[in-house]
Amino acid sequence: MSMVQASAVNESEIRQWLEEVPDPEIPVVSLVDLGVIREIKRDGDTWLVNVAPTYSGCPATRIIHDDVRAKLYEKGLRPSDFQVVSVLSPPWSTDWISKSGRQKLADYGIAPPQPSGKPKACPQCGSSDLELVSQFGSTPCKASWRCRSCLEPFDYFKCI
């Protein structure tokens, strides 16, 4: 792997690289799609990559930081060229999930967050005849729902 000069890359290029990094819990969406990559900026000779975890106790935060570091290193930046920083304020919001990220969630079978706080349709069949099974799903940021039409269970990404 050849190293690149940190000054030879820009924020847009780094963001494109990070679009290749999947969320460790929902691998069909990238960290950029999920909105956890909050800001990429220069601080002197160092790139700062600000990461907002989906919630302050998210167990995937360390993995996310490691995956971001690995991608930047893979693309040729030296570890001294960048710093990955957790940013808790403002807290992450489901509003930050990109339009394409929401579609990827739905295509994967996870109902994307809705302003109403509940899914609008079953990601399997599209029915709106739904019932809450549990406020706690496969991860703390998801709830378990079931479609009364097709009887399939599915995760719903909670609004935060």
Image (cartoon, grey):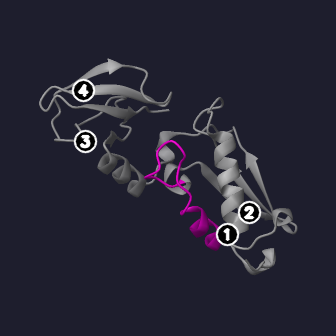
Asked whether the residues under the numbered discs 4 and 1 touch, taking CB atoms below 8 Å apart as contact, a structural biologist would say no
The residue singled out by tag 2 in the image is 41
Left-right relation of 85 to 71: right
User: Which amino acid lies under the numbered mark 2 shown in the image of this protein?
Assistant: Lys
Q: Earlier in the sequence, mark 4 or mark 3?
A: 3
Q: Which residue in the rendered view is the most extreme toward the front?
A: 1
- In the image, residue 135 lies at what x, y percent? 40, 20
Residue 11's disc number: 1
Tell me the residue at 24%/26% (across/down): 146
Asked whether the residues under the numbered discs 1 and 2 touch, taking CB atoms below 8 Å apart as contact, a structural biologist would say yes
Q: How much space separates mark 4 and mark 3, taking CA atoms?
A: 10 Å
Q: Earlier in the sequence, mark 1 or mark 3?
A: 1
Pick the front one: 2 or 98: 2
Tell me the mark number nearer the camera, choosing from 4 and 1: 4
User: Which amino acid lies under the numbered mark 4 shown in the image of this protein?
Assistant: Arg
Q: Earlier in the sequence, mark 2 or mark 3?
A: 2
Task: Verify whether residue 12 appears in magenta.
Answer: yes
Q: Which segment is the magenta one?
A: 11-30
Asked whether the residues under the numbered discs 2 and 4 touch, taking CB atoms below 8 Å apart as contact, a structural biologist would say no
Please rate how many residues cluster around mark 2, counting C-alpha atoms within 10 Å: few if below 14, some from 14 to 19, many from 20: some
Q: Earlier in the sequence, mark 4 or mark 1?
A: 1
Please rate how many residues cluster around mark 1, counting C-alpha atoms within 10 Å: few if below 14, some from 14 to 19, many from 20: some
Tell me the residue at 34%/53% (across/down): 103
Left-right relation of 153 to 43: left
Tell me the mark number nearer the camera, choosing from 2 and 4: 4
Residue 146's disc number: 4
Tell me the residue at 66%/63% (across/down): 71
Q: How much space separates mark 1 and mark 2, taking CA atoms?
A: 7 Å
